[in-house]
Amino acid sequence: MAYTVEQFAADCRAILKQDPGPAGREQVIGKLRTLLMEDDFVAAHCGPDARVGSNLIYEDPELGFQVLAHVMDKGYEGGPHDHGASWAIYGQAVKHSDMTEWHRTDDGSQEGKADIESDREYRMERGDAGIFENGKIHSIA
């Protein structure tokens, strides 16, 4: 039986209500990996007819988490950034993305500027998922 985005959202809600911390987030990553391997989900939200850009698939009315599909029609290379006080669970539905995780080498005293060095580089393929915890600097290509 297919695993749907509705089931995924309900699972995420139940997991995060019970454990909103790192262990709960790891369970959500596992559920996302399952969803990313569902051909119907991929065709509906990430296939050739999907709207290019960031598409909101689901927003939880109680916990406020969102499920987004970022659909790119050509190569994309984003600069290093973080999500501030928020964490982001991410996954790959089609093709691949090259990820880089960074760390600061400065003392953080210059607002809007950071000296950084690469920590880790890796390629995400279909079905891969992970997390950027609060303040983790990363870039995506």
Image (spheres, grey):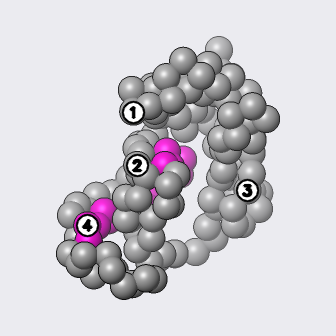
Which three-letter amino acid code belongs to the residue tagged 2? Glu
Q: Is residue 60 above or below residue 14?
A: below
Mark positioned earlier in the residue sequence (2 or 3)? 3
- Residue range highlighted in magenta: 87-104
Residue identifier under label 4: 103
In reply to whether residue 29 is colored magenta, the answer given is no
Which of labels 3 and 4 is toward the front? 4
Looking at the picture, does residue 86 appear above or below residue 62?
below
Q: Position of residue 113 (x, y in %)?
A: 39, 84
Question: In the depicted view, which residue is nearer to us: 27 or 61?
Answer: 61
Residue to which mark 3 is pinned: 55
How far apart in space, not on screen, are marks 4 and 1 (Cα)? 20 Å
User: CA–CA distance between discs 2 and 4?
Assistant: 13 Å
**Residue at coordinates 37% horizontally, 65% vertically from top-left?**
137
Would you call the spot at circle 3 few (<14 residues within 10 Å), some (14-19), or many (20 or more)?
Answer: some
In this view of the protein, which residue sits in the foreground, 139 or 40?
A: 139
Residue at the spot of label 1: 22
Q: Is residue 14 above or below residue 74?
A: above
Contact flag, marks 2 and 1 (Cβ < 8 Å): yes
Element under label 3? strand
Find out whether residue 92 is within the magenta segment. Answer: yes
Give the numbered dot on residue 11. none
Sequence order check, earlier mark of 1 and 3: 1
The amino acid on which the numbered mark 3 sits, given as a three-letter code, is: Asn
- Does residue 10 appear to the left or right of 93 in the view shown? right
Mark 2 and mark 3 residues within 8 Å of each other at the beta carbon: no
Q: Hey, what amino acid is under mark 4?
A: His
Earlier residue among tags 2 and 4 = 4
Distance between the Cα atoms at labels 1 and 3?
26 Å
Q: Where is mark 2, residue-wise?
A: 133
What is the spatial separation of the Cα atoms under label 2 and label 1, in whole angstroms?
9 Å
Q: Quadrant of residue 6?
A: top right
